[in-house]
Image (cartoon, rainbow, N blue to C red):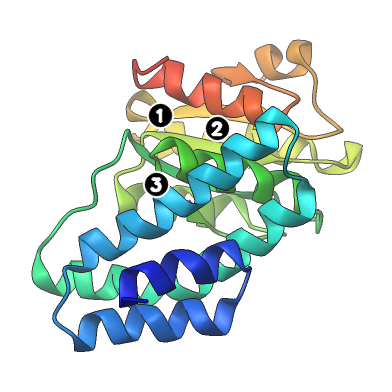
């Protein structure tokens, strides 16, 4: 099995250690890091397609995403050094807002966004509004995806939007919100660009933002 095939297999096997090892091996062999990243994206897409078809399940998405997250920094650094660029529909900054430590929903969204062809920067959980704004600026993001499952943290969505406006970034980025504490009326009331309760629906919303729906 060649290195890229091994990398794809590691994603399919949810083997984070093997994925990172194959990513490093690909670079040692002089393979194009953009091509290696595309190999992982294709593997994730197969799993995402299976999830939407009902033949794959949530643990499959989580395991594959963890494997890709282990290898991605290795390849992304090589892409940055080489001056290359990953082909992408758009750039997304995503995370769970400050005060909330729920991750499964937003991780599902991120995995399916990657599978759909987006460049995703997942910040994690309990993320301060200022960090979302900084990530938008640093990555030239087209979309911010905010998750809030707790009613007491829903107001953080509004804070992110306000800080984006204060920083002069609001016009360049679409804000999509979701999570158990959010509904369409709330999203509209805070000036979000869209709301979607499901992970597959969030992908379609993101695609509509970049004209790819």
Residue lying farthest to the left in this orientation: 83
Is residue 177 visible to the viewer in this orientation of the structure? yes
Instruction: Please indicate whether residue 110 sits to the left or right of residue 134 in the image.
Output: right
Residue 123 placement (x, y as % from top left): 56, 59
Q: Which mark is residue 170?
A: 1
Element assignment for label 2: helix
The structure residue drawn at horizontal position 53% and vertical position 65%, both measured from the top left corner, is 11
Residue 159 placement (x, y as % from top left): 63, 38
The structure residue drawn at horizontal position 80% and vertical position 19%, both measured from the top left corner, is 183
Instruction: Please indicate whether residue 12 sits to the left or right of residue 5 in the image.
Output: right
Depth check, mark 3 against mark 2: the one in front is: 3
Could you say which quadrant of the image residue 6 lies in? bottom left
Element assignment for label 1: helix
Residue 117 placement (x, y as % from top left): 38, 39
Circle 2: is it few (<14), some (14-19), or many (20+) Cα within 10 Å? many
Disc 2 and disc 1 in contact, CB within 8 angstroms = yes
Q: Which mark is residue 140?
A: none
Is residue 110 visible to the viewer in this orientation of the structure? no
Label whose residue precedes the other's in the sequence (1 or 3): 3
Q: CA distance from mark 1 to mark 3?
A: 10 Å
Q: Which mark is residue 161?
A: 2
Q: CA distance from mark 2 to mark 1?
A: 7 Å
Q: How many marks?
A: 3
The structure residue drawn at horizontal position 49% and vertical position 43%, both measured from the top left corner, is 45
Label whose residue precedes the other's in the sequence (3 or 2): 3
Of the pair 168 and 184, the residue shown nearer to us: 184
Q: Which mark is residue 136?
A: 3
């Amino acid at each position: 099995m060649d290195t890229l095939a091994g990398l794809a297999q590691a994603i399919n096997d949810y083997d984070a250690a093997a994925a990172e090892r194959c990513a490093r091996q690909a670079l040692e062999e002089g393979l194009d890091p953009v091509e290696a990243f595309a190999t992982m994206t294709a593997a994730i897409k197969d799993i995402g397609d299976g999830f939407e078809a009902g033949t794959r399940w949530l643990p499959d998405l989580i395991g594959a995403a963890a494997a890709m997250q282990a290898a991605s920094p290795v390849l992304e650094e090589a892409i940055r050094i080489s001056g290359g660029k990953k082909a992408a529909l758009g750039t997304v900054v995503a995370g769970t807002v400050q005060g909330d430590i729920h991750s499964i929903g937003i991780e599902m969204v991120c995995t399916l966004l990657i599978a759909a062809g987006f460049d995703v920067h997942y910040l994690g959980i309990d993320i301060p509004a200022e960090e979302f704004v900084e990530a938008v600026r640093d990555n030239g993001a087209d979309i911010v995806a905010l998750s809030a499952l707790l009613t007491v943290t829903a107001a953080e969505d509004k804070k992110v939007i306000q800080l984006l406006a204060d920083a002069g970034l609001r016009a360049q980025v679409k804000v999509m919100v979701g999570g158990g504490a959010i509904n369409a009326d709330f999203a509209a009331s805070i000036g979000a660009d869209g709301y979607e309760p499901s992970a597959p629906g969030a992908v379609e919303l993101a695609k509509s933002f970049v004209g790819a729906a």
